[in-house]
Image (cartoon, grey):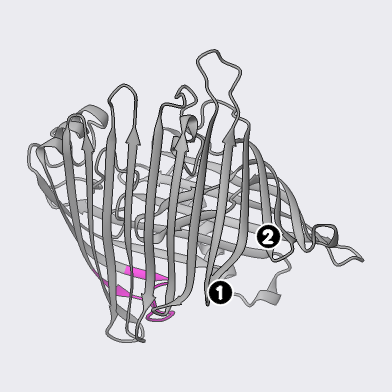
């Protein structure tokens, strides 16, 4: 895809995103972020992520252009009230500092969703049946873009089937992301509707991964319990506990099928967004994960971060973010702390979730020698590596401008 084609896509996206719903027959939604940034040491922006950490704090720390265009069309409404529909999503990715081809070594273009759904089925007590490639049950933390529980996959499923006071969902899949090497038969069952307190609900989930047809492969499993509290400081609080063995140690995903049952992982996730006043909002998170391996290659990951936002006016915000990652591994304890300040124009409003946002940002990060050594071995071109943008320094900074927008 060349620049002219991308410009046309973005222009059409903006135009349709601002049209009233009845101006087009299908449901068209999307998301994109883009911008430009530079290292204060000269050269292109280099983003900061600690080796062994599964996410990074994203404000002023994203090094790509990214676009999603989603189209959903209801095809047929049946006499029993059920509806047949289809949905597809095109996804475009390209790294900063490279020609925006959205293809090849520094980018890609693909259909991340393409599925059919039969929804509102009386036979399923209002639930639905779907088949294809679908984003499904995606639980994520926005400030780090971390999907800790995610059943997106290629397969089929039954969604939100009501039985008594509870709702049951099941997914059969063979592949949960484009980077998964083996086709693994996976079964995901989720039960929701345990109302524990006013505004509070518990979800329970279990995943079972069959053994692939290879001698060195193993079966695995994982479980999760999550409590969701609405109307919490004007936002939502989520607390989750996850545990897995074998290939289930990837917890929200399909893991390495060569791992046997002696490999264990568990994780605790706590985060919430708040809107305490009209002007003051934000999000805070804590993630702790412990991986135990029989070969002694154990690892503990701790991540703590916060993004406070203060709206000076209804369209101008001052956004800050502080994120700290620490990984205890056999080669030492790696540490990274990232700070960002971003004056932001937000024409839709002052809230945490209001978009679009146009941000000017300054990002500063510090890390230790253990992080630098690990980066040199695992990702030699990264910002933390001694061969990266900052050389042997244990700190660095970036400046830039970014646009983020979503519409439904």
- In the displayed orientation, state which residue is furthest to the front: 196
Q: Is residue 388 visible?
A: no
Question: Quarter of the image containing the C terminus?
Answer: bottom right
- In the displayed orientation, state which residue is furthest to the right: 79
Dominant secondary structure (helix, strand or loop) of the stretch shown in magenta: loop
Name the secondary structure under disc 1. Answer: loop
Q: Is residue 142 above or below residue 313?
A: above
**How many residues crowd around disc 1 within 10 Å: few (fewer than 14), some, or many (20 or more)?**
few
Depth order, front residue of 31/310: 310
Q: What residue does disc 2 label?
A: 167
Rendering coords of residue 289 (x, y %): 33, 45
Among the 4 quarters of the image, the one containing residue 370: top left
Q: Is residue 6 left or right of residue 378?
A: right
- Label 1 vs label 2: CA separation? 35 Å
Depth order, front residue of 244/29: 244
- In the displayed orientation, state which residue is furthest to the top: 215
Among the 4 quarters of the image, the one containing residue 354: bottom left
Q: Is residue 276 above or below residue 329?
A: below
Q: Residue at x 31, y 87 (%)?
A: 313
The disc, 1 or 2, on the residue closer to the chain's N-terminal end is 1
Q: Residue at x 38, y 47 (%)?
A: 267
- Magenta residue span: 342-358
Instruction: Name the disc covering residue 18, or none.
Output: 1
């Amino acid at each position: 895809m060349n620049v002219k084609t991308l410009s046309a896509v973005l222009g059409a996206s903006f135009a349709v995103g601002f049209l009233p719903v009845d101006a087009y027959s299908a449901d068209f939604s999307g998301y994109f972020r883009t911008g430009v940034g530079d290292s204060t040491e000269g050269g292109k922006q280099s983003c900061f992520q600690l080796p062994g950490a599964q996410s990074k704090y994203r404000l002023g720390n994203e090094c790509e252009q990214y676009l999603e265009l989603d189209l959903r069309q209801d095809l047929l409404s049946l006499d029993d009230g059920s509806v047949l529909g289809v949905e597809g999503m095109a996804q475009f990715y390209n790294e900063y500092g490279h020609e925006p081809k959205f293809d090849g070594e520094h980018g890609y273009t693909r259909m991340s969703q393409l599925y059919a759904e039969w929804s509102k089925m009386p036979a399923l007590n209002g639930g639905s049946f779907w088949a294809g490639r679908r984003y499904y049950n995606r639980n994520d933390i926005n400030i780090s873009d971390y999907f800790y529980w995610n059943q997106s996959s290629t397969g089929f499923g039954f969604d939100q089937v009501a039985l008594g006071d509870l709702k049951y969902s099941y997914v059969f899949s063979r592949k949960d992301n484009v980077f998964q090497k083996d086709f693994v038969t996976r079964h995901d069952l989720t039960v929701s509707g345990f109302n524990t307190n006013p505004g509070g609900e518990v979800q329970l989930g279990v995943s079972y991964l069959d053994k692939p047809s290879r001698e060195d492969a193993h079966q695995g499993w994982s479980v999760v319990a999550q409590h969701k509290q609405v109307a919490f400081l004007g936002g939502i609080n989520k607390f989750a506990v996850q545990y897995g063995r074998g290939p289930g140690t990837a917890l929200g995903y399909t893991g390495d099928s060569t791992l046997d049952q002696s490999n264990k992982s568990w994780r605790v996730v706590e985060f919430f967004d708040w809107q305490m006043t009209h002007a003051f909002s934000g999000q805070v998170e804590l993630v702790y994960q412990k991986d135990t391996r029989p070969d002694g290659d154990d690892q503990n990951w701790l991540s703590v971060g916060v993004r406070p936002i203060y709206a000076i006016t209804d369209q101008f915000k001052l956004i800050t973010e502080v994120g700290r990652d620490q990984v205890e591994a056999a080669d030492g304890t790696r540490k990274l702390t990232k700070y960002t300040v971003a004056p932001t124009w937000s024409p839709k409003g002052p809230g945490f979730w209001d978009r679009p946002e146009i941000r000017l940002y300054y990002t500063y990060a510090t890390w230790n020698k253990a992080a630098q050594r690990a980066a040199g071995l695992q990702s030699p071109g990264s910002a933390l590596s001694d061969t990266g943008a900052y050389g042997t320094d244990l700190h660095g900074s970036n400046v830039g401008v970014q646009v983020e927008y979503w519409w439904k």
